[in-house]
Amino acid sequence: MSAHVNAPSRAPQDLSESITGGVGESPSRPDGNLKVRGDYAYSSDLWAEDMLWGATLRSPHPYARIAGIDVGQALAYPGVYAVLTHEDVPGDNRYGLKIVDQPVLAEDVVRFRGEAVALVAADHPETARRAVELIAVDYEVLDPVTDPKRAAHDGTLPKLHPESGRENNLVRYQPVVRGRQDVSADVVVSGTYTLGMQDQAFLGPESGLAIPAEDGGVELYLSTQDLHSDRKQTARALGLPPDKVRLTMSGVGGAFGGREDLSIQAHVCMLAMHTGKPVKMMYDREESFYGHVHRHPAEMYFEHGATREGKLVYLKARMYFDGGAYASKTPVVVGNATTLGTGPYEVPNVDIAGWGVYTNNPPCGAMRGLGAVQPAFAYEAQMDKLASALDMDPVELRQRNAVDQGSVLHTGQKLDYPAPVGELIERARNLPMPPERDPAAEPDIRDLPGGAANTTHGEDVARGVGYAAIIKNVSYAEGADDYSTARVSLQAVGGEAVAMVHTAAAEVGQGLVTVQQQIARTELGVERVNIHPNDTSVGDSGSSSASRQTYITGGAVKTACEAVRETLFERATARLGHAVPDLTIVDGKLVSDSHGVLADVVDILGDEVIECTREYHHRPTYPLDPETGQSELVHVQHAFSVHRAVVDVDTQLGLVKVVALDCVQDVGKSVNPDAIVGQIQGGAVQGMGLAVMEEIQVSDGLIRNPSFTDYLIPTILDTPPMKVDIIERGDPHAPYGVRGVGEPPTISAGPAVLAAIRAATGLDLTHAPAGPEHITGTAH
Amino acid sequence: MDFLRAASLDDALATKAQRPDIAPIAGGTDLMVAINFDHIRPSGLLDLTSVPELADWSESGGVIRIGAGVPYARIISELGEHLPGLAMASRTVASPQIRNRGTVGGNLATASPSGDAHPALLACAAEVELASVRGTRRLPVAEFFTGVKRSAAEPDELITAVHLARATGPQQFAKVGTRNAMVISVCAFSVALHPDRAEVGTGLGSAAPTPRRAVEAEEFLAGELTSRGMWTDPRPLPETVVTRFGELVAAAAAPIDDVRGTASYRRHALGVLARRTVGWTWDEYSTGRQTCA
Amino acid sequence: MRLNLTVNGRPHQADEAWEGESLLHVLRERLGLPGSKNACEQGECGSCTVYLDDVPVCSCMVAAGQAQGRAVRTVEGLADGDRLDAVQQSFVDSGAVQCGFCTPGLLVQAHDLIERNPEPTDAEIRESLAGNLCRCTGYEKIMDAVRLAAQRKAVS
Ligand SMILES: Cc1cc2nc3c(=O)[nH]c(=O)nc-3n(C[C@H](O)[C@H](O)[C@H](O)COP(=O)(O)OP(=O)(O)OC[C@H]3O[C@@H](n4cnc5c(N)ncnc54)[C@H](O)[C@@H]3O)c2cc1C
Ligand code: FES
Ligand code: FES
């Protein structure tokens, strides 16, 4: 491992367990043993001799002017080493993923409840908390902007970011129009759908440890989704060149988009550099709700027209996304939602528009299924509504309109890879159904809505079945140069050829480490593949988001392995004195069809290390035309999944028990089938949570439920058995034909569950999550 | 903050008398949340987990005394038959880990309108035993709750036990939450039939500033059962009686809109729970067969 | 405050613990045993589950002083040297571990379940693990792992 002079205890380890299995197999995780022993080093486990604890003072108001900050008392508190405000930000007091609009520490104004205002470093977390309390901030409270639609259109509201140069409080406006705009249709259905704010609710709190370095730089150990993006933003805030800010990944306790933006990064480094001591920072669960972005809530009007035979004629859609106080990924949400807003269906005439806005609500950004989750709730509700208006089977209607390879989407992009949506829907319909409830049998209350809380013994329980088919883009889009870097080495260790894979691509739980090993084993023909901790001493890998890493970093590892292999073959040729045409490596031996076993890889390597670093770039994408939303290739790849949900609803109490949540998904090429099943099931339960219980409740800019007591995520008793049916229709443009896996199930599960609840109750249910109040008509 | 471990009840009461602002700690499942999140900073903690007088339950003359420190897990496994309502309520509290630690004493002391033991205790006409160096007293649980998270306990008092008559008829508890486990109640309801004295007991949770009974509903149902001679000759409960009982329970509630639910949902749901649970208890009473578990 | 307790069979001492600290904090920050995880510190997630005198509890809900003189067993104490406990091995083999943050608490809770109930039904497994949140797996492979562990323990 990289030997930092003053590495903290419990710094990340090399993963070097001996496990076997190449691409297409299901080897277990190289970090599995460490994790079940409790020995895996997460960022909240970090510890250094003599370290201090950092804490953050956050704004209690959604919108206020800061007239003054007095840190005197806090600084004087025994055990306090530093109290910092915006005046102490050494570099540029601005950061941001897409738009650099967020202060590291608030200056003259705070724009959301929870915005960071000042920092403390102290000898104990309790000391830090007491000191935070002693910082006196003089706020002039202002009326917050909280209505996203008004924020988009009402010029009389305060402009939260006048520097943006955009109209009103707009972050991005994007139309996508195609075909005729003056069409009518035999049957028209419309509806307005709303979606609450969802939290990633990863379990590992935001945390990290910064250690000042002798060269004036800083070492930061942390959990994140994107080391290089963090480094760029942090270095800018610290006023340091990027190479002086060295980041190392510690164990990440889940991410789901919530670790794309900075949280502790710049803050903890400022404290460490200011005090000259190691500083650890860790949010508690409440602070975590303020300290990371959430999924954009949305309001969406959708209108579909179709022929009597059930062919879609037109779609008109208007979508509003509340980005909250800072832009974060709002531009991407608008881009994804408008380019994916038709769903996986062919619609000849389309008029879609999306607005992403600034308000004084909590900032929203990346979360699994970014920008694709919201419209899926709308277009899938519409498909069921249309089926009902046409008196047609909803599955049949979806099949009639499903895209396929060769379809042209409303952006003008032609799908030049398999898009087997019709097949997915067919397979979902054919999956075996869970057994019917036997009304005569004595029920186990744990299987009923309400569970062990004993609310029904079968009374008023109705079953419903719902389907949802969805589309998601994979990887970065709209012209971003999307690439990853991998460094692969091969050397003889103890008589065995051992490969090492080193990337900055974040392992957040998804199993990228396993996939990297599998690729290296397959490409290099050696069993032993070690994984170097992720850090910034190797090139950029981009973010573990957008379902992209198996594709992009997988591609980089494959490319680097190929280069290592070529080098090895060149050496072999030199050693053997003649070229052998069809060399491969099998079980650590150089083999050729014509000559049989030629040499041990170990012998060819001798004492030398072969090391190659390679970048992998996917084919270029192109921006959307700002007025028409047209683009030759806006997304490098699309992924598709279909869910079928079966639910039991207590129609009197509005309680829901999901009975089955089965998925069919095209994964292109199944690199690790077991891990894919795990991704699909985990993703599905997040979608299910959004359909039935998960909502950050915001009123007047304040979060009313910043805790796991009142922000509820599904427990194991809420979760049904989930069948997964994987098909592989390779994408010829992608390494091994892979297709992004992580996000689609999160997108399809929620609308399927909601559809099933509608089927069970006969209600419209236009809001997700559908709570007991919505189902019983007692919301007000 | 300091930490004291009481070895006996006398020891604990003496400390509490000297330092009324010290926070007793039993299972810690309310108190530690408040400390971890910096909501309170008591002057000290008084650990009750080693006080033998609080640690057990006993029965004498048909009345069960549950020490304030008996965790839910033991109530579920040891008292399910004697006190089915309280055991059912205990089973809905939080998770197994929390039930291994959390106590009825702590639930009462917190006096939250959403405490799940409360409706069951109300329906069983339990008494709360309070002790101080001044002596011991017993208070009907309905008089114990005085406001949101406020109780009749004096600053120098500890809750030492609850007393409940051993069940003489069926009891039920049902709680609504927005997920199927590990959830604070949106509303809860408990009903107990007391055929020995021809009475009905009820308790409502998360329905008003304090846990409360639905006295009119109790009297209505007991009156109907008595006047129809159904205590001794149980026949199916008329639909009109079930409906009226539900209405009276809902009418007894004075709920609010909060982050967990709306007032109108709560009132509606309490009516539903009342109708269902009274049906289950009556089925059991009339057939001798318990439904579900 | 000075604390003496036994953790995973070994006596431990923590000096200068603040009285408001939880057992979880003491284990993680004072005794060098960060295996038990701190995902909520409000009793809701179960990641911090440890045995306290053979009873699984959320260690974030136990005041440090309450552990004085007690025996604690954490995830670090489940394996027998190099040999993983059947529950641990089954979690690895079933793919029940993704980010792994929920894993330590789940392992202790599942370990206790199988000790008390060697042949749990699915409904019993779910009720018993309802206080252990996992955000990654959707629980299906956790169910597989617990079933497998019960089978393995039954034959061994
Ligand atoms: C994750 C989680 C879920 C929960 N879910 C539920 C639920 O579903 N239903 C529910 O009802 N509750 C729930 N609770 C709350 C809590 O578990 C219960 O209120 C429990 O009964 C508290 O008991 P305890 O022994 O842990 O109390 P402690 O936390 O030890 O004490 C609680 C309060 O009572 C005082 N106190 C304790 N014992 C005494 C005594 N003998 N005399 C005087 N004062 C005393 C303490 O000073 C403190 O103020 C939950 C808590 C958590 C953490
Ligand atoms: S950290 Fe203890 S229950 Fe979540
Ligand atoms: S594996 Fe990540 S929370 Fe369970």
Image: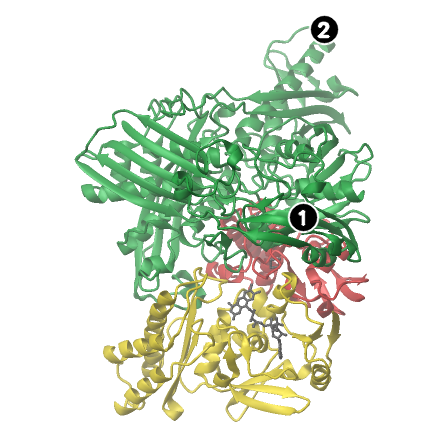
Chain colours: A green, B yellow, C red
| In this view, B266 is above or below A515 | below
Q: Distance between the Cα atoms at labels 2 and 1?
A: 68 Å
**Which of labels 2 and 1 is toward the front?**
1
**x 66%, y 7%: residue:** A579
Whether residue A336 is situated above or below residue C90 in the rendered picture: above
* Residue drawn at 41 percent across, 32 percent down: A173
**Picture coordinates of residue A569 (x, y %)?**
67, 14
Task: Give the residue type that dot 2 points to.
Answer: Gly
Q: In the rendered image, which quarter is residue A374 located in?
A: top left
The crowding category of the residue bearing disc 2, from other C-alpha atoms within 10 Å (few below 14, some 14 to 19, many at least 20), is few
Ligand 2 quadrant in view:
bottom right
> Do marks 2 and 1 both belong to one polypeptide chain?
yes
Q: What quarter of the picture does the C terminus of chain A occupy?
A: bottom left
Would residue A727 be visible to someone looking at this image?
no
- Which residue occupies the foreground of this view, A753 or A385? A385
Instruction: Give the image location of residue C63, x and y in percent.
Output: 69, 67
Q: Tell me which residue sits at (35%, 28%) in the image.
A: A176
> Considering only vertical position in the picture, is A21 above or below A719?
above
Q: Is residue A598 left or right of residue A461?
A: right
Instruction: Examine the rendered structure and indicate whether residue B97 appears above or below residue A479.
Output: below
Viewer-closest of A433 and B105: B105
Residue A713 placement (x, y as % from top left): 49, 54
Q: Is mark 1 within 8 Å of ligand 2?
A: no
- Work out whether mark 2 precedes mark 1 in sequence or the reverse, and give the earlier one: 1
- Image quadrant containing the N terminus of chain A: top right
SS under mark 2: loop
Q: Would residue B139 appear left or right of A633 to someone viewing this image?
A: right
Q: Which residue is mark 2?
A: A577
Residue bearing the label numbered 1: A118
Which label sits on residue A438? Answer: none
Kindly identify which chain the residue marked by label 2 belongs to.
Answer: A
Quarter of the image for residue A347 reads: top left
